[in-house]
Image (cartoon, rainbow, N blue to C red):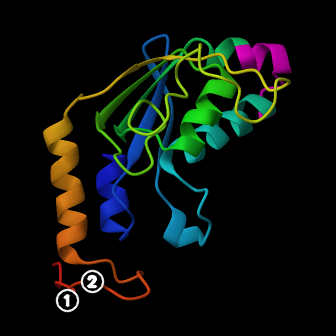
Amino acid sequence: MESKLALESLEVPVGCVIIKDGELIALGRNRTTETRNATRHAEMEAIDNLLEMWQRDGLSKAEVAKNFSQCILYVTCEPCIMCAAALSFLGIKEVYYGCANEKFGGCGSILSLHSSYSEPFISDKVPQRGFKCTGGLMSSEAISLFRSFYEQGNPNAPKPHRPLVKVE
């Protein structure tokens, strides 16, 4: 659903949800164009929503870390390197994604930041916990959303590669 909202907003159609104990606790969608901030990927939006909620609830850093270790994230597309690194640092339990991200994927396509055995890439002081990662969940639906986005053309691109198609 979040990915369709992103598509309707002329964003790259990536959406995610975070589940803890079988309950939906956060969601996010790409908002990079809307916010004019390249870091506003679906995963980062959902993480920030959770952090704000847990901060309002007065959770300690240890409680936040424990909560993240019990969370499962479902996302349209393989998390990019930035998002996979953030998820690893936070210690998320599991990630399920639709289609691979052949250009920027951080869960196996380019780097394997989900693997607990991967070398620390920022410093030895930043813990990388790793997380279980499974791709291919509803991949044909995810690919279809991406096709729709690229076929309609991106009006926000500096030089559109193909004419824009008016979507009604």
68 sits left or right of 96 in the view: right
Looking at the rendered image, the quarter that the C terminus falls into is: bottom left
Q: Residue 147's spot in the image, x, y percent?
A: 18, 60
Q: How many discs appear?
A: 2
40 sits left or right of 146 in the view: right
Query: Is the residue 27 above or below the residue 87 in the image?
Result: below
Give the dominant element type of the magenta stretch: helix, strand or loop: helix
Q: Which residue is mark 1?
A: 163
Q: Secondary structure at mark 1?
A: loop
Magenta-drawn stretch contains 136? no
Cβ–Cβ below 8 Å for labels 1 and 2? Answer: no
Magenta-drawn stretch contains 57? yes
Residue depicted at x 35% and y 45%: 101
Q: Which residue is mark 2?
A: 161
- Answer with the quarter of the image where residue 9 lies: bottom left
32 sits left or right of 125 in the view: left
Report the disc number at residue 47. none
- Answer with the quarter of the image where residue 100 lies: top left
125 sits left or right of 116 in the view: right
Q: Secondary structure at mark 2?
A: loop
| Distance Cα–Cα, label 1 vs label 2 | 7 Å
Residue depicted at x 37% and y 48%: 2
Label 1 CA crowd tier, 10 Å (few <14, some 14–19, many 20+): few
Residue depicted at x 17% and y 78%: 167
Range of residues picked out in magenta: 56-65
Which is more foreground, mark 1 or mark 2? 2
Query: Is the residue 154 above or below the residue 105 in the image?
Result: below
